[in-house]
Image (cartoon, rainbow, N blue to C red):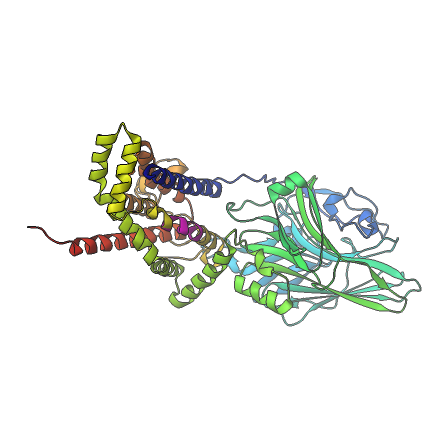
Amino acid sequence: MEKNNIGKRDLILAIIFSAVFLFLIDALFPPTQPVNTPSVVPSAPNISAEAQKQTASAQPVSEHSYAPAPNALGEQQNNTISVVMSQEQAVNQYRHIPIKTPSLSGSIRLKGARLDNLMLTRYHETLAKDSPYITLLSPVGTAYPFFAEFGWVSTDAISLPNADTLWQTQDQELNSKKPLTLTWDNDAGLKFIRQISVDENYMFTITDRIENYGSKIVTLFNYGLVGRTNVPPSQRGAVLEGLVGYLDSSLKEFPYAKMDKEEQASFKTTGGWAGITDKYWMAILAFDQNISNVTVKFSQSNTSAGKHYQADYLMPPTVIEPGQAVQTTGRIFAGAKELKLIDAYEDQLKIKRFDLTVDFGWYYFLTKPFFFILSWFYSLFGNMGLAILFFALLLRIAMFPIANKSFASMEKMKEIQPKLEQLRERYGDDKMRLNQEMMELYRKNNINPAAGCLPMLIQIPVFFSLYKVLYISLELRQAPFYGWIHDLSAPDPSSVFTLFGLINWPIPQALNIGVWPVLMGLTMWLQQRMNPKIADKTQNMILSLMPLMMTFLLGHLASGLVIYWTWSNILSIAQQYALRLKNKKGKPHHG
């Protein structure tokens, strides 16, 4: 029996450390995504004629998905090739209407009414004072085009607005107080009036009105799409970057690597959303939540400019009688993943499970509450690092009774180690008798050998959830702590192997370990010293190496996580030491 218990404990420990090790390996060394930086790109692409002739079951497709062909207006697609341009150069190719809100700056291209130039003015690329704003959307012609557009397709040969259509407007600017109104007439019985509005944050609303002043019944299909050509370099790890949607009451996730393999996925849904997401930013389409039989498609295609990824939706047919008009509304969230704001949109606009645009991971039921608790502490202390420390303290208090029982069991195990060694020496050749004697020793001392594993098992989902929160939290991005920690979402920038920059010599990146990871490793080592040794020498040796291994593995993760782990270790050591003192005082003195 005793042998079985010890074996179970060893197995549990092995599983725990293996899980942690594999998890960290996955986080630190994820599969690399192909990043194609093109040397040439199409300078003036458009949606070709085929996109105007889709059947009801087909999907709208961006210009990259078709070969050049005459469009519905009889014009040839411009397929000239140009060198990769800067954002400003690409924008200046066409007339754009400026966007100015408290959160955004950029412009809308009048040709095609395309949203393809957008900066997030509340966020900068780096900590430098002159750092540029985060660029979310970029026009075709840049290295990483990323854009959104809305439109109509038909089963009939009807002239419809497309990527080459030059919309007309009297407005000079789009801001949060005044919408932008665009018009276009096909001179064949249809007038299109598009109103684009934006709030003070990141939600755009596109309202399309079509007036049929002709003599024929017209059937149209409304669509919206977001497309990205090439994937810019970014942090990759335990967070989704790629195509995502909440469709048919379930979350659909398609990282770029998955789309490269599958190339296409199609869904039917009533309500929901779909788009392209990064770690901190996203462009998400939110169509009418009450209309059923909406077709959503994720696709990847290889083009001369690179790999093109697209998320789009196609609404059911809209019939417009002569002399009548219809109106449709679509939305796109183009901005930062601010969870409180996303929750507000979910509530106000009734967008189904919009909060799942934030990648909470497996332990959603823990991750989201942890996020709000940390955010509240941050609002109290004004420092995310202090919020992390206080949160760790509360977790330690919440788990105090369980940890106390575990520590008490380990202390008893440590006390009887000499007696266990004596039994092994005496009955080493008789395993059955050794197990019987050990079990009797445990029974007399009221010890459960496996009790020490329980707190660790409980802490696994807690740790993973907190890791996820700290990894995805926008509030942690570029948030300072004290001393040399200026960004809690980045690794500790100090390096003990260069004496903090005093010695300038090349060292492998794996050895570029800062002060906080070293402190974390030391506290783990102290914890191990306070615990009883495992009888098996091989396992004991492996466990003794864990602090060193974790120092180098965790040393390259967000410093906020390392600070949490170090502080949690210190609290654990203090609790265990206090229990040891209490036990010593409670023992009778013999003299």
Viewer-closest of 126 and 374: 374
Q: Nearer the viewer, residue 70 or 290?
A: 290
The quarter holding residue 5 reads top left
Based on the picture, tell me whether residue 333 belongs to the magenta stretch.
no
In the image, the segment drawn in magenta is 455-463
Q: Is residue 447 left or right of residue 343?
A: left
Horizontal side, residue 211 vs residue 15: left or right: right
**Residue 311 shows in this picture:** yes
Left or right relative to 399: residue 415: left
Relative placement, left or right, of 439 versus 36 is: left
Residue drawn at (36%, 41%) of the image: 9
Closer to the camera in the image, 61 or 507: 61
Residue 176 location, quadrant = bottom right
Residue 127, x across and y down, in percent: 45, 55
Q: Where is residue 283? Give x, y as percent.
A: 62, 56
Q: Position of residue 522 (x, y in %)?
A: 29, 45
**In the rendered view, would you say 170 is above or below 475?**
below
**Residue, far right:** 215
In the image, residue 120 above or below residue 41: below
Q: Which quarter of the rendered picture does the N terminus lie within?
A: top left
Q: Residue at x 41, y 43 (%)?
A: 16
- Prevalent SS, magenta region: helix
135 or 455, which is in the foreground? Answer: 455
Task: Residue at 24%, 33% (x, y): give it.
Answer: 424
* Residue 572 percent across, percent down from the top left: 30, 53
